[in-house]
Amino acid sequence: MNSYQMYDDLLDWIDITKIDWDILSNNKNAVCFLEKNEDKIDWFNFSELSGSESFLEKNTDKINWDNLSLNDGPNTIQLLKNNPDKINWKYLSVLPQGYELFKNNMDKMDWFSLSLNESLSAIKILEENPDKIDWVYFSKNPYGVRLLEQNKKRIDWVYLSMNEGAGVETLMEENEAQLSYSCLSLNRNKNVLKILERHLNEVNWVLLSSNPEAIYILEKHQDKIDWDSLSGNPKAIHLLEKNPDKIDWYKLSGNPNAIHLLEKNTDKIDWNMLSTNPNIFKINYSFLKQSAFELNTEIITERFHPDNISKFAEWGFEVSEVWSV
């Protein structure tokens, strides 16, 4: 079973005739629903959708191979392995799991894209080839903080201001005058936001209002809030509920935590934006029940295998207790 099967149909109140199928074809929770409505799939968008790989494998003639090369789904690499002549190496070089393919095709790898690749495997290659790094875009890479600390003169401080990597705040604190506080307003690293609080006069409040990790700052400065941006912020529902007259319904239509508000105001919904909303689907409880059963069976089979009897005491069981159950 695949996790995308957790969602298999639209919520009852949603008018299916108003859904934009092209947009829905790139909705992260729409895979199972789209498989049941194959004639409405936009294959260009669907090819990039994580979880779509199994269905794409049955419809290889419809795949957009450039977009598949950007698909971060668990089975993308195998599908590309089977069709190496169709790989877009520039796009693949961005994918964290792409290392499995480009490690043996270094001549085809795109160094610009690799500089954006958020994986330890990519960082290792870049560390070995520092002259090929695009330092502007690499400055944003959350996995590159240690290498950036070793090459401070090469840092682009605007892009570093968007870096959400662990420990990046130390590098920023040493160079606060060089940061872009507009870009910093989008940064979701809570330690970085502490730096931003020291420069509130330089904050971009439009961008900050969309930042889910900045709610505590916005709550203290509600007169500075940009309500259009806030309407798309998934952690701002409590503020929006208290200020319904300030809601931007276009932005709210895409807000995953606003489903209850949208259900009560269907006349205000922007249906194109709603088609991007991952929470417009019902949860498939039968799938969850079956998944839980399979997981429990697997755990029980592994834990109570005869080979593990000697470990029962470590796990807090007395052997006599186990077999008396």
Image (tube, rainbow, N blue to C red):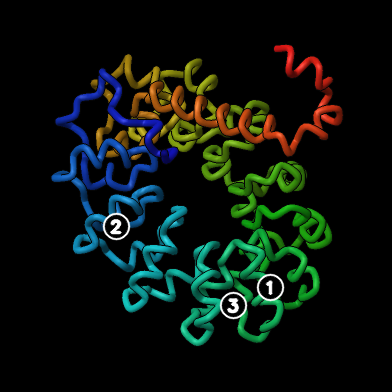
In the rendered view, tell whether residue 131 sits above or below residue 220. Answer: below
The CA distance from mark 3 to mark 1 is 15 Å
Q: Label 3's element?
A: loop
Judged by depth in the image, the label closer to the viewer, 2 or 1, is: 2
The dot on residue 134 is: 3
CA gap between label 3 and label 2 equals 34 Å
Do callouts 2 and 1 mark residues in contact (Cβ within 8 Å)? no
Q: Position of residue 203 (x, y in %)?
A: 63, 46
Precedes in sequence: disc 3 or disc 1: 1
In the rendered structure, the answer to whether residue 289 lies left or right of residue 275 reads: right
| Residue designated by label 2 | 57
> Could you tell me which residue is drawn at 55 percent across and 62 percent down?
96
Q: Nearer the viewer, residue 180 or 144?
A: 144
Residue type marked 3:
Asp
- Percent across and percent down for residue 33 are 27, 36
Among numbered discs 2 and 1, the one appearing first in the sequence: 2
Image x and y of residue 135, in percent: 63, 75
Q: CA distance from mark 2 to mark 1?
A: 32 Å
Categorize mark 1 by other alpha carbons within 10 Å: few (<14), some (14-19), many (20+): few
In this figure, which residue is indicated by the disc labeled 1? 124
Q: What's under tag 1, amino acid-wise? A: Lys
Q: Residue at x 66, y 62 (%)?
A: 160
